[in-house]
Amino acid sequence: MKKIICTLLTTLLILSLLVTPVSATSQSNTQDAVLHFDANSAIKHWQPFSKVYCHIWEYDGEAFYPWHSDKSICTDSDNDGIYTYNLTENGINLKENTQYCCLFSTNAGNHQYPLLFDTTVLGDTAYLTGDYYSSPEGCDEYYMFWNNKDHREHGPELVINPIGQVLGTCMPKGKTPISLLQNALINSMENARMFLGKSDQKIIDQIAYQLGLSCEQVQNTIENSGVKVEWQKELSTADKLVGDADNDGEISILDATAIGLHLASLDELSEEEQLLSDIDFDSKVSILDATKIQRKLADYIFY
Ligand SMILES: [Ca+2]
Ligand SMILES: [Ca+2]
């Protein structure tokens, strides 16, 4: 069933990538515009593949070429696993100060998550870390990052998906944490309750935590959205340091230890400390919270 839905999604994606006419602008006087993909980073995570494609579309716009068209093929002439897409040769001329989406795919049908970029990224190499997002339909969409760019400025598109989960790292132009929350309140709350099995309070506090919103901002956004939710400012963790299980004002390895001791019934966390320990916002203190704190400390982007 998962496979059918994934195939269906791919078909929809293909259909949505409508062709726009591309003027073959000559850039013969300048260096070719290229993007690279380090396929070596994907070997552990993806099915074996023999072809790599690069799809580019303007953010909120249409793709330059249809899915897996001949104009999207990447080459690896020296066989080192670094595939190159030559935009110039394929007649793609990017505008400056414009946000584009890019997606490297293979003939093996792996699923990827869109990567935002602009002309300052040209020449850079995309790679996988192995972090992925499991969609409600059961597809694992792998995140890609640019080798030389901050993942917050040029990276996986930051969105709140239809079931209220915050994904990606890079805010699209024209959007803000508040606009994302407002949109999620209006469009995603019903699905979020159903799929995540969390209270409104936890769903909203988790979004606030991941987007860095304060209690005040959350309250105002809820009021402006006009959506009825069970959320109370007094119970919110939006202004608190979630992950600081021992409530000493900083997140350290001692917080993971404190959770471990609490779970082993060797040392009990207070009610406030339990609230701060619940970094996955499932209303329980579990070993998963300790693991997430450790990942956060180890600088994992998704923990
Ligand atoms: Ca602490
Ligand atoms: Ca938890």
Image (spheres, grey):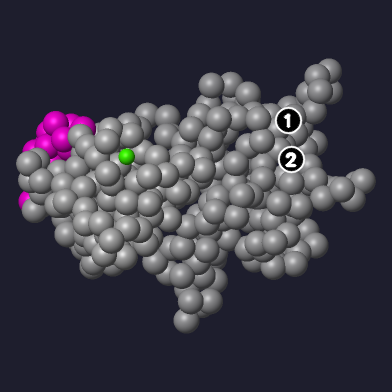
- On screen, residue 185 versus residue 1, left or right, reads left
The furthest residue to the top: 29
- Mark 2: which amino acid? His
- On screen, residue 224 versus residue 206, left or right, reads left
Query: Tag 2's secondary structure?
Result: strand
Cα distance between the residues tagged 1 and 2: 7 Å
Task: Characterize the local packing of mark 2: few (<14), some (14-19) or many (20 or more) Cα atoms within 10 angstroms.
Answer: many
Q: Residue at x 63, y 24 (%)?
A: 120
Query: Is residue 256 at all visible to an observer of this figure?
Result: yes
**Quarter of image, ligand 1:** top left
- Mark 1: which amino acid? Gly
Q: Nearer the viewer, residue 219 or 157?
A: 219
The furthest residue to the right: 78
The reply to whether discs 1 and 2 touch (Cβ–Cβ < 8 Å) is yes
Q: Quadrant of residue 91?
A: top right
Residue 237 drawn at (x, y percent): 19, 42
In the picture shown, does residue 292 fall above or below 101?
below
Q: Which residue is mark 2?
A: 36
Q: Quadrant of residue 30?
A: top right
The residue stretch that appears in magenta: 214-228
Q: Nearer the viewer, residue 98 or 182?
A: 182
Query: Tag 1's secondary structure?
Result: loop
Task: Characterize the local packing of mark 1: few (<14), some (14-19) or many (20 or more) Cα atoms within 10 angstroms.
Answer: some
> Is 220 covered by the magenta stretch?
yes
Residue 268 drawn at (x, y percent): 21, 57
Q: Which residue is mark 1?
A: 123
Residue 209 drawn at (x, y percent): 29, 41
Q: Quadrant of residue 175?
A: top left
